[in-house]
Image: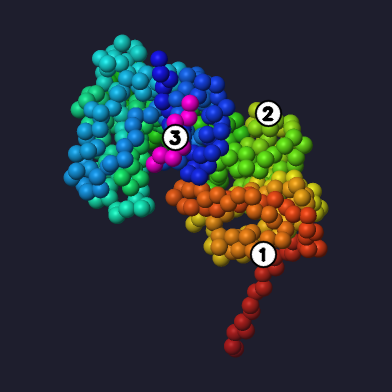
Amino acid sequence: MEPPTYWASCATGLQFCLRSELEAMDGTDVISDSLAQGGVLFRTNAEPKELAKMRAADNIYAFLGHYQDVPLDKEPAIEYFTSLSAKIDWKSPLELYSRWQQLDETKICSASRSSSQDKENVDGSSSPLTFRVTSDRICKNMRKQKYTSMDAAAAIGDGVNELLGWKASMRVYDVEVLAWIRDMELLLVVALIYSGNKTIERICENNVGEQKYTTENLLEAPLFSEVPKDTEVKLLRPSRSEAQLHSRRQYRKALVGTSLKPSTSYALLQLAQIKPGHIVLDPMCGCGTIPLEAADCLGGQIMSIGADNNPKAVDAAAINVGGRGGGGACDVLNWDAANLPLRSGTIDRVVCDMPFGNRCGNYKVREWLCPKVVKEVVRILQPGTGIAVLMAQSKTMRQEVEVSQKTFLEMLQHILVEMEGLTVDVYVVRRTMEPPPIHEFRPKKANHKRQRIVAKPH
């Protein structure tokens, strides 16, 4: 019997790391890593619990189909999307979906029902499953599509409803079908990790006793089917943040507005070629994802340090350090990345996701700050062996790495990565033996604001 087919997603440009992780698994055959969306298509007989431990994947899905001839005009595209369901062999993906619902983490979800040919649920009831279709559409190399993402999702949903008899539900659903459209290319998958809120099919608000149930006391709540007819029930919106593989990381307790995905952090750490005994530093760590991922992966073999100048980010990182179940040594500090209180040549590896995008403050400040951080990275890296992996989106950053610091940094790799619709640069550089300029530590000066006093005329 042929192994089931999966699609594991990741940031576009970092598929190499996910592919390497999959190729190391016994009985896994990688099919492709160059489809419409960033990720890897593969077959494997590995158990869901083993696949759920993958670190380089954002998420994992059951593969439905890959199509490269999607029309650009609206009417033929709608007709094309509606007819897709009849072309898909649903049996294998839905059997795979049912297996994944047996994981301990998803037993309390409403998506624990299986799908058989007669549409019966696990509990023996014959009510049809509920579903929704989520579509993501991007036009890069061709003229813009004449249809919207909502048009595509509605057309695919009509086909699924007509073929399988499932009922569409946008907020409370059992199965989620995802469609990624890139130009004329379409990737169709089924989510294996439930993306709805875990309070689905549970009473969230009861008129009689005013009892509210959250994820903390969810197991005490009665099933939705047990609720009296005259009881008002309020269902919460689905939460996609809990439906990712990286949401299983024990250290992921507190986040900041621009938190890096642990799967992306893992890929950056692989580029750094970290070895036992190394000191790994992220001078702009945010909530601490990179240093915590390093400590979590390599256990007690390394020393991991994170730091940030934002007190809120440091507080969030401290919560994550304290909330993890184990791992190696990790510490979080509050300091200025442009003026590091470290001796020259003392750090083995620097892995840093530098701020970029509209949510990371003023663009001019970032353009001024990033080159200063690079100069500090040059100073603290061990000459000859130190490696830095720097992710950034900045013209001055590219000028600093490729030109200004060329004497001190040898370019090993330059990778373009798509992050939330933005294309960012990942620089992998090695410190040369050239001695850095003499550094003088500059303590932070107090910020005294001057007040202008205007004398009022008598």
Q: Is residue 369 left or right of residue 240?
A: right
| Type of amino acid at the residue the image marks with label 3 | Ser
User: Does the magenta-highlighted stretch encompass residue 95?
Assistant: no
Q: Nearer the viewer, residue 130 or 179?
A: 179
Residue 225 image offset from top left, x and y in percent: 33, 18
Q: What's the amino acid at mark 2?
A: Gly
Label 3 Cα crowd, 10 Å radius (few <14 / some 14-19 / many 20+): few
State the mark number for residue 326: 2
Residue to which mark 3 is pinned? 32
Image spot of residue 182 (x, y percent): 35, 45
Give SS at disc 2. loop
For the residue labelled by badge 1, is the local secondary structure a helix, a strand or a loop?
helix
Q: Residues within 10 Å of mark 2 (few under 14, many from 20)?
A: some
In the rendered image, the quadrant that contains the C terminus is: bottom right
Circles 3 and 1: CB atoms closer than 8 Å: no
Which labelled disc corresponds to residue 432? Answer: none
Q: Which tag, 3 or 1, sits closer to the chain's start?
A: 3
Query: In which quadrant of the rendered view does residue 109 lie?
Result: top left
As drawn, is 275 to the left or to the right of 145?
right
Residue receiving disc 1: 404
Q: Give the magenta-colored segment's residue range.
A: 29-36
User: As shown in the figure, which amino acid type bears the numbered disc 1?
Assistant: Ser
Where 199 falls versus 313 (above or below)? above
The Cα atoms of the two marked residues, 1 and 2, are separated by 41 Å
- Which residue is rendered at x = 68% and y = 35% of the image? 295
Query: Which of labels 3 and 1 is toward the front?
Result: 3
Q: Residue at x 63, y 37 (%)?
A: 293
Residue at 48% x, 44% y is 12
